[in-house]
Image: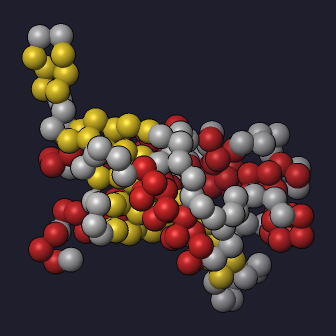
Amino acid sequence: MIKIGKYEHYKMKINIGSKNKNKIEALREILKDYPDFCSTRVVSMEVSSDISDQPKSLDETIKGAMNRARNAFDDCDYSFGIESGLMNVPETKTGYMDFTCCAIYDGKKFHLGLSSAFEHPKVVMDQIFNNGLDASRAFHAAGLTDDTYIGYSEGIIGLLTKNRLTRKEYTKEAIRTALIHIENKNLY
């Protein structure tokens, strides 16, 4: 950011397809680590993922992140879409793990990154698959949290790790791995 008098001027504008404070703050904090993004204005906007409330596959979760990025691309240099969902993982107790995907869109190409993954308790997975709940509501219905919107606070990962890894920090993993493509354009 460059200050001229009382006005602030930014070299770059990035849109993020979310109003979730964890996602927005994760993006803002990560961008400070990258010289090309140190003077960036981040604008959050509510956009549709055009998928179900609880993605249940790797493909659907990636598609949701890409849709969010595409739907947020408006008068900006880059747009970011971040989506959490489930993916099938053999040999796990429930058959699924939760992960986050970050899609960066430059108006022509997508640049993807993923977070680490973790498994939900079986009682939660039963709520998701048998009752059609998203993960936040499933944790609440299973009696594991009083917070019906846990994804907007500490996150499920925060609950399960006793805040050793929060939703914001978990989201940063996906953002950072997607930024590999931007920072190393000559390789991708």
Q: Is residue 131 visible?
A: yes
Position of the N terminus, as image quadrant, is: top left
> Left of 68 or right of it: where is 134?
right
Q: Position of residue 118 (x, y in %)?
A: 62, 68
Q: Is residue 22 visible?
A: no
Between 116 and 82, the one nearer to me in the picture: 82
Q: Quadrant of the rendered structure where residue 180 is?
A: bottom left
130 relative to 158, above or below: below
Between 15 and 71, the one nearer to me in the picture: 71
30 relative to 43, above or below: below
Q: Position of residue 98 (x, y in %)?
A: 63, 67
Q: Position of residue 132 (x, y in %)?
A: 84, 64
Q: Position of residue 156 (x, y in %)?
A: 67, 53
| Residue at position x 69%, y 44% in the image | 150
Residue closest to the far top: 6
| Residue at position x 74%, y 51% in the image | 136
Q: Quadrant of the rendered structure where residue 123 is?
A: bottom right
Between 174 and 77, the one nearer to me in the picture: 77
